[in-house]
Image (cartoon, rainbow, N blue to C red):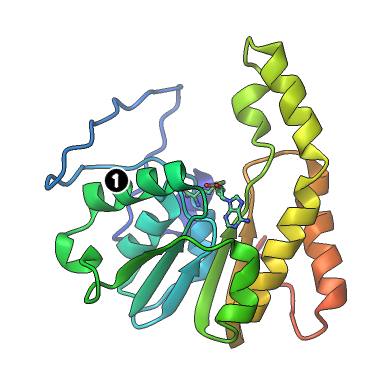
Amino acid sequence: MDLCVSMAPAILQGYVHPTALRFPSQPHRPGQLKQYYLLNAGVLALQVRDGDKVLDLCSAPGGKALAIMQTANPALLCCNEPDSHRRDWLVKTLESFLPQSQTRKAVGTVIVSSQDGRSFGQSEAGTYDKVLVDAPCSNDRSWLYSSSGQQGEQRLRERGSLPGLQAQLLRAALAAVRPGGIVVYSTCTLSSCENHPVVERVLNTCPKAQAEDLWED
Ligand SMILES: C[S@@+](CC[C@H](N)C(=O)[O-])C[C@H]1O[C@@H](n2cnc3c(N)ncnc32)[C@H](O)[C@@H]1O
């Protein structure tokens, strides 16, 4: 949330509350826009500008896509999600927060795609100004304190294969971005092997990509 407050353009409002506070959720109603969406603000590092072509490679349920649309007017925002249930959720999010003129098929700014993100590098190489890889991750926050030990064990097993998938997605993003464009890799896990080592591994094999230090921002 600190990040949100310091980096956010004025149009994107950040709220900081001294104690834990739960915002009430708002039900999905087709044709009716919702008032707020809660998310972390890593997407601001993408620095989306008006007229950009943006790819949100792992998009559901769509929180970062909404943040992008709130900070700029991209020429195109391609929201990609291969999982059909999660894609339905993504479509509902977009319908709940964006006017129909932006999401209408064929004419809208925002399109939904269903590819495996790993194939974007070949299918749309050098196409986008900005690419967000909000990667699938072990999301330890959601299960670490869960009462279901079984769920925790399953997640621990799955965790081993995630860095490989994450590296493939990041490589695809680097291929899909135009020369001079920006790629942001983000996760919501504390598991260190899914964070810096993934980025380092990919940078070692992509000599044209340069890492940017965001600490000062
Ligand atoms: C952390 S979530 C994304 C959250 C989303 N960016 C947001 O702000 O609401 C990661 C997403 O990546 C999707 N995913 C999993 N494997 C993928 C793949 N091979 N290519 C693209 N997306 C994938 C998952 O289904 C999941 O919806």
Q: Which quadrant holds residue 110?
A: bottom left
Q: Residue at x 42, y 59 (%)?
A: 8
**At numbered mark 1, what does the secondary structure look like: helix, strand or loop?**
helix
Q: Residue at x 74, y 79 (%)?
A: 210
Reading the image, the residue beneath label 1 is 92
Residue 217 in sight in this render:
no
Q: Is residue 35 left or right of residue 49?
A: left
**Residue 7, position in %: x, y?**
48, 60
Q: Residue at x 50, y 81 (%)?
A: 129
Quadrant of the snapshot with the C terminus: bottom right
Tag count in the figure? 1
Q: Is residue 24 left or right of residue 5?
A: left
- Cβ of mark 1 under 8 Å from ligand 1: the answer is no
| Kind of residue at disc 1 | Lys
Using the image, determine if residue 58 lies above or below residue 175: above
Count neighbours of disc 1 (C-alpha within 10 A) and say few if under 14, some if 14 to 19, many if 20 or more: some
**Residue 34, position in %: x, y?**
20, 42
> Which is nearer the eye, 214 or 98?
98
Using the image, determine if residue 136 lies above or below residue 107: above
Q: Residue furthest top?
A: 147
Q: Residue furthest left?
A: 31
Q: Is residue 38 left or right of residue 106?
A: right
**Residue 87, position in %: x, y?**
42, 49
Residue 205 in sight in this render:
yes
**Residue 173, position in %: x, y?**
63, 71
Q: Which quadrant holds residue 140?
A: top right
Q: Residue at x 52, y 85 (%)?
A: 127
